Image (cartoon, grey):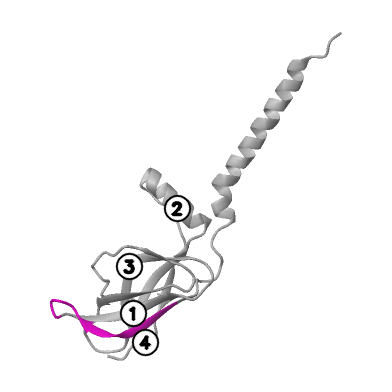
Amino acid sequence: MQPNNNVGINVRKCFFIAIVVVVLAGLVLSPLWLGTPPTAPTVKVAFIGYTNSSSSNRLARFRVSNLGNVRVYRWDLFRTQLEGSPAVVNVDPNPRTSVILNPGQSEVLSVAAPSGPGRWRGQALCSFTGLSFQWSQLMLKLTHQGTRVRSYDMNSEWIDK
């Protein structure tokens, strides 16, 4: 009596399919398991002075610096906040290109300075560029709907007008 080779082939096929399913599930679920670290990125937002725009509007200049050892994504939104106000006001209406800041890299932004009394500060929105961020960007490109990415408000010191 000859052994049945079909049984051995079927077992190998099932084993191969199981491995493929586990690997694909790991790739799909890894952004959830390997999400962003629980602490905020090490980003410094520093006020560096005032300037005027070409239309003579008063602009505030900020340096956004990545002081950490991992890449950070700075979203295309920079806000100003008046002290004592829970609401963020004077959202800069000029769309900018989002930037990935490598470790040690900085950029300088100019935004409309708030008018009115009191102290204020600048606020940059940043995220880590880990697997969950990359997964979200891929889903955005494929489906035009991103997934949730943890972002952090990185504030400057309070500025006296």
Cα separation, mark 1 vs mark 4, equals 12 Å
The answer to whether one can see residue 88 in this image is no
Residue type highlighted by circle 4: Trp
Q: What secondary structure is found at the residue carrying circle 2?
A: helix
Considering the numbered disc 4 on the image, is that residue within a helix, a strand or a loop? loop
The reply to whether dot 1 and dot 3 touch (C-beta < 8 Å) is no
State the extent of the magenta-drawn residues as a range. Answer: 44-56
Asked if residue 11 lies in the magenta stretch, the reply is: no
Q: Amino acid under label 2?
A: Ser
Provide the residue designation for mark 3.
77
Give the Cα separation between the discs numbered 1 and 2. 28 Å
Instruction: Give how far apart the Cα atoms at labels 4 and 2 are.
Output: 33 Å
Q: Seen in the image, is 116 located left or right of residue 132?
A: left
- The residue wearing badge 2 is 136
Residue at x 23%, y 83% (from the top left corner): 51
Q: Which amino acid does label 1 sit on?
A: Phe
Q: Percent from the top left, x then y, of residue 21?
A: 61, 36
Position in image of residue 42 (x %, y %) = 50, 74
Residue 45: name its quadrant: bottom left
Q: In which quarter of the image is the N terminus?
A: top right
Check if mark 1's residue and mark 2's residue have beta carbons within 8 Å.
no
Q: Which residue is drawn at 42% across and 72% down?
A: 153
Callout 3, which amino acid? Leu
Tell me the residue that label 1 is attached to.
62
- Which class describes the residues within 10 Å of circle 2: few (<14), some (14-19), or many (20+)? some
**Residue 32 seen by the camera:** yes
For marks 3 and 4, give the CA distance. 19 Å
**Residue pushed farthest bottom?**
160
First along the sequence among labels 4 and 2? 2
Q: What element carries label 3?
A: strand
